[in-house]
Amino acid sequence: MRQTLIAGNWKLNGSRQSITDLLAAVAAGLGDDINADVAVCAPYVYIPMVEQLLKGGTLAWGAQNVSEQASGAYTGEVSAAMLAEFSCQYCLVGHSERRSLYHETDEVVAAKFAALKSAGIMPVLCVGESLEERDQGITESVVKQQVLAVINDCGIESLSDAVIAYEPVWAIGTGRTATPEQAQEVHASIRALLAELDKTIADRVQILYGGSMNPANASALLAMPDIDGGLIGGASLKADDFLAICRAA
Ligand code: PEP
């Protein structure tokens, strides 16, 4: 039985005050009625503050990006070892906004994934097709290529302590969600791909859905057999909505 994970992705949002308020409200609402691991992925500069606010509690935290480099002349970058110093448990890699706006290739994503593994941080590997690719009927091959890019570089065993997030690009921040059946179909295909290489890892890896998940659609999505949680953007900025999604798990 896979544990459900609900992870918030705050993106480029928040301030000292708003994050303090949000975390206080979320932490206060996380009671026995929540049957999921819960995490928030913060902008880099707020991670030390998030660590101070959350340490010793049940809410985990992480980052939204990492450098593939360990150290050196890479101005503006943050390494996996630096994130580990602030007890980040998770870090997103390959979010579609990083792939499209910052031109991160599958190779770069795989290198970032490897950097996180060596620092003992759980990568959340984001994959997903554009609307054009879905319309062309190539969703599964696009997602397969994104997953295989990591497996070819890091090995199938690297997924034994990693999370995959299926996020159709057309559903991120658009208010348009994949139907539970559409999402389940892709999740099952990812798990089948992994099972061809290692059945134990395939059965164990958490595959999250992301893309306009909200309190109204979370239950139906999370009820699907291969949907093991959610990566939540916009709704993770509102304590009530985020908690309602956690309760739906
Ligand atoms: C995301 O950024 O990963 C995401 C799923 O965003 P939203 O929930 O706003 O669609």
Image (tube, rainbow, N blue to C red):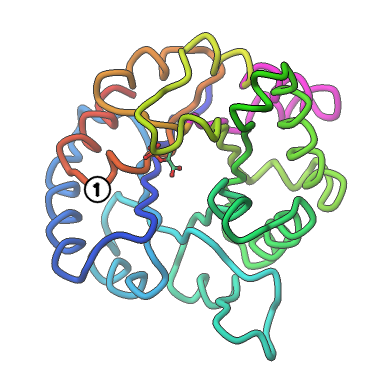
Residue 65 horizontal/vertical position (percent): 54, 62
Task: From this view, report whether residue 221 is shown above or below residue 31.
Answer: above
Q: Is residue 190 magenta?
A: yes
Tell me the quarter of the picture where residue 147 sits.
top right
Q: Quadrant of the C terminus?
A: top left
Pick the residue in front: 225 or 235: 235
Residue shown at 44%/59% (left/top)?
Answer: 62
Q: Residues within 10 Å of mark 1 (few under 14, many from 20)?
A: many
Figure quadrant, ligand 1: top left
Count of numbered circles on the image: 1
Q: Amino acid at mark 1?
A: Leu
Tell me the SS state at disc 1: helix
Magenta extent: 187-209
Judge left or right: residue 60 versus residue 92: left
Residue 200 horizontal/vertical position (percent): 73, 27
For mark 1, what is the residue? 237
Residue 48 horizontal/vertical position (percent): 34, 75
Which secondary structure dominates the residues rendered in magenta?
helix
Residue 236 horizontal/vertical position (percent): 29, 43
Judge left or right: residue 71 versus residue 52: right
Pick the residue in front: 7 or 211: 211
